[in-house]
Amino acid sequence: MKSKLTYWMPLIGAILLVGGMWLGYLLADGDQISPAQQKLNTIFEMVEDEYVDEVSPDSLVELALPEIIKNLDPHSLYIPASELDRMNRDLESSFYGIGVQFQIMSDSICVVEVVSGGPAQRMGVLPGDRIVAVDGESLTGKNITNEDVFRYLRGDKDTTVKIKVVRSTSKKPLDFVIKRGEIPSTSVDASYLIEDSVGYVRLSKFAANTYSEFLQAISSLKAKGATGYVLDLRGNSGGLLDQAILIANEFLNPMQNIVEVRGRNQHDNANWMADGSGSFIDVPVVVLVDEFTASSSEIVAGALQDNDRGLILGRRTFGKGLVQRPFMLPDSSQIRLTVQRYYTPSGRCIQKTYERGKNTNYEKEIVDRYSTGEIFSADSIKFDKENIFTTMNGRTVYGGGGIMPDVFVPSDTTGLTSYYFQVANGGLLNKFAYEYADLNREDLSKAKNVNDLLKKLPARDVLLWAFVRYAADNGVPQRWYYINNSASLIVNQLRALIARDILGMNAYFEITNTEDIAVKEALKQLHQGLDDILGAPVNKENENE
């Protein structure tokens, strides 16, 4: 018993110290020290004076602060001074690493987003993967910090790192050897004319340059003849609020609400409205969302939905509506503290429910959507009947967490077989495509666009046979019943991955979108017109005809 107490005393002391400091800020009235602060300070002084070992207050603070802050809510965060510069660069510039955004859960690094075009994506790492070992060093049972993750995964250009990941669709852990490279800071993954008059733009995040990139992309598509747009925010975990406001402003009429934030104090409340300067106020737009669409992405989707300005299509968004404000500490560390909540123009709070100190349940919520069937069937979605709101045109929308789409599109399971999971999880699709592109690069590089490239690739059956033999040589036996069921998916993926290596990310989405059921439905809705769902004409010019 004594040994256990001795082990935990430093952490207890740290919690008391930081708790006292924290409560002092919250509870002190001028120079008056609150009873709670006085009590905690007394206990800390007792530990400092009487505890059997000498303890460094600085080390205790660094140990305890992350635990205290993360138990306030799922998104408040303490950032040591040593990590702050590197974390800020994720939204500002480039760095060398493997190209993943992560969240530490239990004793593993959970990949929440894979940077498009980055080294990790090229090797087949997927969102949801849990990194459990790095360069042979197991992470199990370790108290991993953000600083540890940066140390493990970032490094000099062209150095390699070996990671072991656990994936829900694989019975065995998967190994990836990844060469570190420059991680691009661009936000527009793809922009092209998906049809003669329809532009497609995919945003991966909301960084400092997102609005300028987006405006350049969508203006270019307009110049090429686009009169309607598909804005793809699937997998976009958010970022900077001002960038989301600027993008929403491009589509809204003057004085239409974009987003409201409310905090504990009156000075924390604010409301943003469109100024009418947008260049795309009168054009039809469909916004694609899914369960990984979060934060700033939800602000854009909510603003367009509540103003009946755009059609939201896909699945219920993540539900991150807590706003963090950075507070610098004397040692140049930082606390990103939740100070506000987001509300859409109809008054809905975007944030899904959570229990303080129970982040594991919060993190599991996305997994629960799969187990309850919400991802696959609209009938499985349970609306919060106590949180009913109306859009500008009187349509019913629901609060309680996330943005519910106007048109539900289930997760596509077509072609998903045990064979596909085996080759995909083993990184064989990526490896085959990379090796094929590399061997044939001289000829393939002559292609000027996707159509030229597809003409240079083998016929469907030939490409499939070549891959099946490659997979068999790499330990995946030929099981033709499952191969035939997955054939279209495998071939489409291979073509897209080869195109990405030759022509870039734009080409990748040009090919994958041909089989994407959400994209197909978006085009269908644009052709039919959005008036029936939104309740009012979207295009004013058509209204006057």
Image (cartoon, helix red, strand yellow):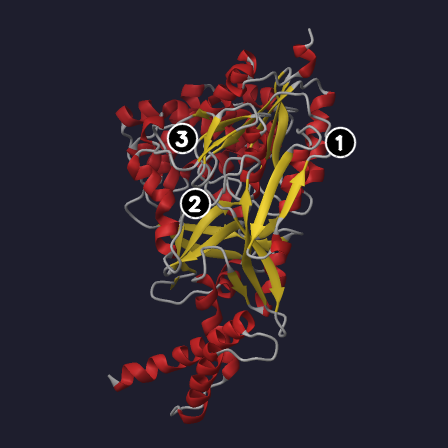
Name the residue furthest left: 1
The x, y position of residue 175, in whole percent, is 39, 51
User: Percent x, y for residue 539?
Assistant: 65, 16
Which circle marks residue 277 in the picture? 1
Q: Is residue 237 above or below residue 50?
A: above
**Label 2 neighbour load within 10 Å: few <14, some 14-19, many 20+:** some
Quadrant of res 505: top right
Q: CA distance from mark 3 to mark 1?
A: 51 Å
At 66% from the left edge and 18% from the top edge, which residue is drawn?
227
Mark sitting on residue 352? 2
Question: Mark 2: which amino acid?
Answer: Lys
Against 355, residue 373 (above or below) is above
Secondary structure beneath label 3:
helix
CA distance separating discs 3 and 2: 43 Å
Foreground label between 3 and 2: 2
Q: As shown in the figure, which amino acid type bears the numbered disc 1?
A: Ser
Q: What residue is rendered at 45% in x and 86% in y?
A: 42
Q: Within the image, what quadrant is residue 210 found in? A: top right
Say the numbered circle drawn on residue 467.
3
